[in-house]
Image (cartoon, grey):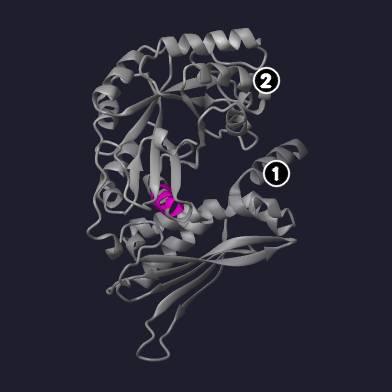
Amino acid sequence: LLVAGGIAGVKLLQTTRGKALLMDAGVVGYYGQVQQALDDGLRGVLVEAGLIRGLEESRGVRTVGDERFIYYDWWVACEPPCNFIDINLEITRAVRRAGGTVRSGIERQPSSKREPPALVFDIGSRRYTTHKIVIEKRPARAGGAAGGASGSGSAGRAPATARSTPGRAGAPRIALVFDDFGYSKSELVESFFTFDLPITISVIPALPHSGYAIARARANGKQVILHLPMEAEEGPASDVAAVLVTMSDGDIRALVARYLAESPGVVGVNNHMGSLATQDRRVMQSVLAVVRSHRLFFLDSLTSGKSIAYNTARDMGVPAARNTSFLDADTEDVLVIEGRLLRLLETAREHGSAIAIGHPRSWTFEVLKRNLEVLKDSGIEFVFLSDLVD
């Protein structure tokens, strides 16, 4: 019983709910992870309810222990007729699924004719706020949708095309990278090659259909990079030979050079798995020496928060970039993926650019397909990965 209870306790603390409990107990470093999990769930509700276009977002500052964190302050337009009961239930369920707490939730009655009725939420852990949300029964404001989808402010902007072209002055830019090609030549795979935005295809070498994936992606005007297998801290082994931390410098360089020789037309490299290998400076120096000799760039997929791959590349003069977010690595839920995609637009607006990694999965393509016009009309320029390396 003690062992079973201990295992259950460890598993709980690995969930968002457990991290929220730890945060309330004073381990404030989990604030960002709890906030991210809640953010994904809440945005999924707004997408499902058709309210994401009416989202406007600002930021507030919350002091947690000795640290200061940013919480999200949302105003959401809900055009009448608007069912507050259903929205309240869905938000409460999403927060509970994500492991958080609805600290307070009230229906505000108008105190004057100018003030519309509203749902007002304070969401987070039991002690700390991550989101404050006001959902009002009124039309969206002109120029709204600052929370990530397109709004009236995007009217008249030129849509992205299937080829990366010189950008509009000052336009935020996003590079979408899709990993793990080479396993098959299915209809789904073809859908990514013909998708009507500039996307970067990352192909695992030495698979049955690696050559096919490279050829078809290039034939359809997509950019192609090598998805280099590298050793992970844990989890399944790579399906093909990977760069291991126990390998000599010479063996690492030989393997990378061989994979590049088998992958004609690639313009860059990113790591497949690699949460262990990307923490090892010697290993990364060996990998990047070959990347540099071929005049390619390197994308740090950031499969580990401890990765030094990007900084090592910069130190060695290799053009490099870092992944901003994974769209679908841990979920098949189209609402979660959609929320992350729409949040990516917001990130690009805030920082000028963003990079996201996804995979050739049916649920991911469903999200891309149904949001294509939103992406094109967002005012964001979609570019190839090479446009965002530095």
Q: Which residue is drawn at 67% across and 61% down?
A: 68
Q: Mark 2 points at which residue?
A: 282
Crowd tier of the residue under label 1, counting other residues whose Cα lies within 10 Å: few below 14, some 14–19, many 20 or above: few
> Which numbered mark, 2 or 1, is in the foreground of this view?
2
- Residue 39 in percent (x, y) is at 49, 55
Question: Relative to 217, is 299 on the left or the right?
Answer: right
Question: Relative to 229, is 27 on the left or the right?
Answer: right
* On screen, residue 140 above or below 96: below
Q: Quick check: can you spot residue 289?
A: yes
Crowd tier of the residue under label 2, counting other residues whose Cα lies within 10 Å: few below 14, some 14–19, many 20 or above: some
> What secondary structure is found at the residue carrying circle 2?
helix
Q: Which residue is drawn at 31% across and 60% down?
A: 50
> What secondary structure is found at the residue carrying circle 1?
helix
The amino acid beneath tag 1 is Gly
Q: Name the residue under label 1.
A: 9
- Residue 137 in percent (x, y) is at 34, 76
Q: Quick check: can you spot residue 361?
A: no
Q: Which residue is drawn at 52% across and 26% down?
A: 271
Viewer-nearest residue: 205 or 312:
312
Give the prevailing secondary structure in the magenta stretch. helix
